[in-house]
Image (spheres, helix red, strand yellow):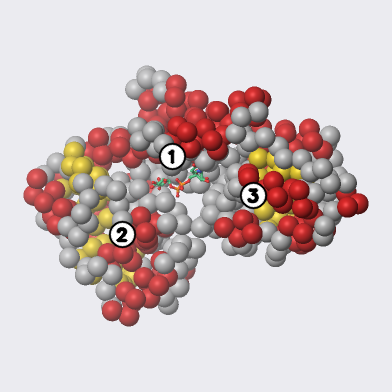
Amino acid sequence: MKIGIIGLGYVGLTTAVCFANSGHEVIGYDLSSEKLHTLKKGVSPIWEPHVEEYLQAALKQKTIHFTKEISNVIQQSHILFVTVGTPSQTNGQADLSQVWNVVSQVQKYGQPGQILVIKSTVPIGTTEHIAQRLNDHDSPMLDIIHNPEFLRQGQAVHDFLHPDRIVIGYSQPQALEKMKHLYQSFSVPIIACDRKSAEMIKYASNSFLAMKISYINMIAGLCEQLGANVDAIADGIGADPRIGRSFLQAGVGYGGSCFPKDTQALLAIAQASKQTLPLVEATIQINQAQPLRLLQRLEQRLSSFKDKKIALLGLSFKAGTDDLREAPSLKISQELLQHGAIVHAYDPVVQSFPIREVICQTNPLLAAQDADAILLLTDWDEFRHLPWGELAHVLKQPLLVDGRNLLQWEQMKEVVATYGFEYISVGRPTLFSSIHPADRIE
Ligand code: UGA
């Protein structure tokens, strides 16, 4: 099948390279000619595991092509995917300008019998609205489908190849059959429903996952007051299959381009229908407070941030990506700088940080040199194996704040006992060292 992809961000590009490696012919379009130029050379413009190797394999087999003419991609595809961004506006509503720009091009160049698939996350009712607009067109398309994506950044290729379910919001049964045929190699449930429900599934799914995170962060706050350990709580409740253990990792709060944007957008959608969504409101509130709660604990411990040097470990919103959108590191470094701290940072993949005053270093030891505390903000695997002895040696005081509960609390007891660290984490008792600073092993 000839598949067109409009918008080559991490969703569009992953979709393109995966289809191109599974027997389809793919043509990709993006507004950025620089991105197209890079892609044609076999280089991925985004840091997403396996995308580049899939891209190179598809280029070699000649199953993927890129074009800077949107008319080409529209005219040549049997199924045309729209994967452009729908960022938040200041009022929380999704900005649909990129989607509507594509629709106006489809109005011009669309072919009879084609299927247009909206994969971008759009407010409930948008796909039907697009269908109404395109139905006025002289040569109507077979159908306008909503097919939400559930790809996680950093695991997008894996998630594309191993989905839990495929959701298809449709109006024409013939188009549904074609979509089922497209996805026939995946033996997972296909949820076929009306287009509004498909759009809602995406928002409800992301809001529910965000709510799970805020729920455990709320419980973590109580654990800190009462001396309980949130890890045990997450294991204890997560073992119940009705609750499930995933997305119960307490920490500094969720970030990224999806949960913050989609929870806000769902609130805006509800507001437009004069409804309230108190669970979603609380989810957002807890998440916004979470980085500040962690900073307050650190500030209390240091008395003040004035002239204190803080080493941030990890800047991206989660491991496996260089994406900084809504990353807790942004809010935290702004707060630290405003309160007079000096901020150095290390991240394995983020090369440049938008806040100029944050000094990016090339390894954790350089970032931690003479620092008053380390603040771990991203769950990068390499931070599980830090050189504790050397860090204790270079730090002004061996204080480690783990904003991701990345390190095993039981194992940290040994690090604390051996190297004299004090270890603060989220919803778990603080570990103090009994070693006198002069007797620390370095
Ligand atoms: C999320 C969803 O997981 C995907 O299913 C969805 O397709 C995607 O949004 C989207 O809408 O496009 P993503 O934003 O890539 O994916 O990242 P997640 O792995 O879901 O993590 C989001 C944030 O929550 C990260 O900051 C992560 O560190 C945080 N998180 C996650 C926690 O704090 N605790 C957890 O237990 C899990």
Res. 411 mark: 3
Name the mark nearer the viewer: 1 or 3. 3
Q: Is disc 2 placed on a helix, strand or loop?
A: helix
Q: Is residue 348 left or right of residue 8?
A: right
* Quadrant showing the C terminus: bottom right
Q: Residue at the spot x=25%, y=35% of the render?
A: 197
Under mark 3, the amino acid is: Gln
Which mark sits nearer the N-terminus, 1 or 3? 1
Q: Dot 1 corresponds to which residue? A: 245
- Where is residue 258 drawn, in percent x and y? 45, 44
Q: Is residue 349 visible?
A: yes
Q: Residue at the spot x=45%, y=73% of the render?
A: 43
Q: Are marks 3 and 2 in contact (CB under 8 Å)?
A: no
Q: Residues within 10 Å of mark 3 (few under 14, many from 20)?
A: few
Q: Is residue 379 left or right of residue 83?
A: right
Under mark 1, the amino acid is: Arg
Q: Residue at the spot x=55%, y=28% of the render?
A: 219
Q: What whole-number distance in Å separates the C-alpha atoms at marks 3 and 2?
A: 35 Å
Q: Is disc 1 placed on a helix, strand or loop?
A: loop
Along the viewing direction, whichever of 318 and 224 lies nearer the viewer = 224
Which mark sits nearer the N-terminus, 1 or 2? 2
Res. 402 mark: none
Q: Residue furthest right?
A: 438
Q: Residues within 10 Å of mark 2 (few under 14, many from 20)?
A: some
Q: Is residue 71 left or right of residue 438?
A: left
- Where is residue 343 drawn, in percent x and y? 76, 50
- Where is residue 151 drawn, in percent x and y? 37, 51
Q: Is residue 360 above or below residue 27?
A: above
Q: Is residue 333 visible?
A: no
Q: Dot 2 corresponds to which residue? A: 161
- Where is residue 147 drawn, in percent x and y? 26, 47
